[in-house]
């Protein structure tokens, strides 16, 4: 291991060390709140180390891991969502009587996997990172055992996640067969050389392999038609886990999609762009249409998260066009930031209203919230507007950038579908707002400092950043331009 | 190709067959354990393809990948069996068709 290798992997190495020490220390910690604080401190230090790397770019471990602006951007987002995930879980798991120290250890292990995903420059790393991030999430989903819903959610997530992992692995094997390498950089050079001379490159095998990888990652980011697990898993898992899963796993999945497809497979765009087009359109329609009929808020938000995966997938449709790609990927990153912020805020409100034994999760339970807890209701209104894509919120800005990028790529109908499905989504998002303000009811919430801070902070940021979104978009664009 | 060895396509054919069997098993069977075994079949199909390609290219990295996959599969077994045991304790069954308490 050279010094450069060490710098490349420093934040991840530190976090790995920290979480191992945390698991040991947890044995001696009586008050599990302290474990949460230590986990948050570890994430904060890792965040500092990551930010210290801004401006650097390097290739470490013989081309296994890459450090560039994109990886730093994504890792910063992941670490922030980890901190928000701990803030939401802190009071929740105590209230639900599932306060065990392993919760935070598993959460951090999952973040390590996600961070590796952002840095992976080799398909082996993509697979290993995918499993490192998924396996702790399976356990977390079943964390409320012996609650049957949570166990069921964990098992379903596990079986379908492992199934998806099998697809990714077989796809990678075929790509290896087609190009003789698993390193993204070498795959690119083999593919590019093949035009001129009789190389080893086998385009058919490559295409099948890439399609299998797409199926596997499609499962992970919950794109239609690979979304069947999402509603059950999101509903059954402890709400704090759902909040983290919805944001973190999506960010990591899209980071992998970007690295693999935009960088290594641009030659396949003629075949794969239409496929991505269809998946993106189906995901937007499927998620938004099924969400309408839901009465359980967790299930509704699960379908909403499927729909948002569709919006983010739009950013990948023009991936073969080098002129549009930086803008569209930057738009995708921006949308991920907007989605993450809104997502944690929304789930924070859901957690505030949730009672023991799964009570307080119906949309009708939100009746009367507007009169009794005006601040919380106002925050929820902001989040619902943001998820719909209405002003003055970050969701609108994110959708604007996305649709603009897709239009630049020449996919007019995809943008039209995006607008239509956003209109459809207004129906079920605004129904929550109507229930909160117009219906009589006795909504009851739990008061917790960190939960309240996360929720209100997210609401304020969602509005404030939307007023001056330029700097964030420029940051995202710079991150993409610095792709290795 | 050395004398007395099978052509590479045989191995790839077998691995494709294994993968298909695995996918079908996941989709058709209803016992969580059998589904899990089918997933393992898919992973091993990938392993076989890796080893075959590594032999074809005379490169070691494909074979090394297989070790990683085995380690991952072992980790999945640990978590998966724990989940299945936990479910069995509460439900006395691991039939996935009976796992329908979550519905909208």
Image: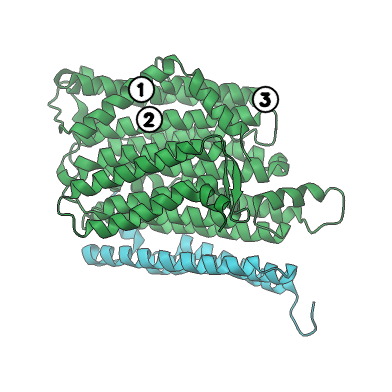
Chain colours: A green, B cyan
Q: Which mark sits nearer the N-terminus, 2 or 3?
A: 2
Query: Which chain is indicated by disc 2?
Result: A
Q: CA distance from mark 1 to mark 3?
A: 32 Å
Q: CA distance from mark 1 to mark 2?
A: 8 Å
The front one of A131 and A83 is A83
**SS under mark 1:** helix
The front one of A424 and A356 is A356
Residue topped by disc 2: A341
Mark 1 or 3: the one toward you: 1
Q: Residue furthest front?
A: A3
Which quadrant of the figure contains the N terminus of chain A? bottom right
Query: Which chain is indicated by disc 1?
Result: A
Residue topped by disc 3: A410
Query: Image point 35% across, 26% down: which residue?
Result: A428
For disc 2, the neighbor class at 10 Å (few under 14, some 14 to 19, many from 20) is: many
Which quadrant of the figure contains the C terminus of chain A? top right
For disc 1, the neighbor class at 10 Å (few under 14, some 14 to 19, many from 20) is: some
């Amino acid at each position: 291991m050279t010094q450069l290798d060490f710098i490349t992997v420093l934040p991840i190495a530190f976090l790995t060390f920290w979480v191992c020490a945390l698991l040991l220390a947890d044995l001696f910690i009586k008050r599990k709140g302290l474990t949460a604080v230590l986990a948050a401190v570890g994430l904060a230090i890792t965040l500092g180390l990551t930010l210290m790397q801004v401006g650097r770019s390097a290739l470490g471990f013989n081309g296994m891991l890459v450090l560039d602006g994109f990886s730093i951007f994504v890792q910063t987002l992941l670490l922030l969502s980890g901190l928000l995930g701990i803030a939401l879980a802190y009071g929740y798991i105590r209230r639900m009587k599932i306060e065990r120290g392993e919760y935070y250890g598993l959460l951090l292990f999952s973040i390590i996997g996600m961070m590796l995903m952002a840095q992976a420059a080799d398909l082996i790393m993509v697979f290993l990172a995918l499993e490192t991030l998924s396996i702790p999430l399976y356990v977390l989903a079943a964390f409320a055992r012996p609650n049957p819903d949570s166990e069921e959610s964990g098992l379903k997530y596990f079986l379908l996640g492992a199934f998806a992992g099998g697809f990714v692995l077989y796809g990678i094997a075929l790509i290896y067969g087609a190009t003789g390498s698993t390193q993204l950089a070498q795959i690119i050079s083999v593919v590019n050389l093949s035009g001129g001379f009789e190389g080893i490159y086998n385009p058919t095998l490559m295409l099948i392999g890439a399609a299998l990888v797409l199926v596997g990652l499609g499962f992970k980011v919950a794109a239609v038609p690979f979304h069947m697990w999402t509603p059950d898993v999101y509903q059954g898992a402890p709400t704090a886990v759902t909040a983290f899963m919805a944001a973190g796993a999506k960010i990591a999945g899209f980071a992998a999609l970007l690295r693999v497809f935009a960088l290594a497979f641009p030659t396949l765009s003629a075949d794969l762009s239409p496929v991505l087009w269809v998946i993106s359109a189906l995901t937007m329609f499927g998620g938004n249409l099924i969400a309408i009929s839901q009465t359980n808020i967790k299930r509704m938000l699960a379908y909403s998260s499927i729909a948002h995966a569709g919006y983010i997938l739009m950013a990948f449709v023009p991936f073969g066009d080098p002129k549009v790609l930086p803008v569209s990927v930057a738009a995708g990153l921006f949308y991920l930031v907007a989605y993450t912020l809104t997502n944690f805020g929304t789930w924070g409100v859901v957690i505030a209203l949730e009672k023991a034994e799964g009570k307080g999760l119906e949309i009708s339970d939100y009746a009367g919230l507007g009169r009794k807890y005006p601040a919380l209701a106002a925050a929820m209104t902001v989040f619902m507007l943001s998820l719909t894509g209405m002003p003055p919120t970050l969701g609108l800005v994110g959708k604007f950038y996305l649709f603009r990028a897709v239009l630049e790529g020449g996919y007019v109908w995809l943008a039209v579908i995006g607008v239509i499905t956003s209109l459809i989504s207004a129906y079920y998002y605004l129904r929550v707002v109507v229930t909160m303000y117009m219906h009589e009811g006795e909504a009851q919430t739990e008061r917790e400092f960190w939960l309240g801070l996360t929720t209100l902070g997210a609401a304020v940021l969602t509005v404030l950043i939307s007023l001056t979104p330029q700097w964030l978009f420029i940051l995202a664009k710079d991150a993409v331009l610095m792709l290795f | 190709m050395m004398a007395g060895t099978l052509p590479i396509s045989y191995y790839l054919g077998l691995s494709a067959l294994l993968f298909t069997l695995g996918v079908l098993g996941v989709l058709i069977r209803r016992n969580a354990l059998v589904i899990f075994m089918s997933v393992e079949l898919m992973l091993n199909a990938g392993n076989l393809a890796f080893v075959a390609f590594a032999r074809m290219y005379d490169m070691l990295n494909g074979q090394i990948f297989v070790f990683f996959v085995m380690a991952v599969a072992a980790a999945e077994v640990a978590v998966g069996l724990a989940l299945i045991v936990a479910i069995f304790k509460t439900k006395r069954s691991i039939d996935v068709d009976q796992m329908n308490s979550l519905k909208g």
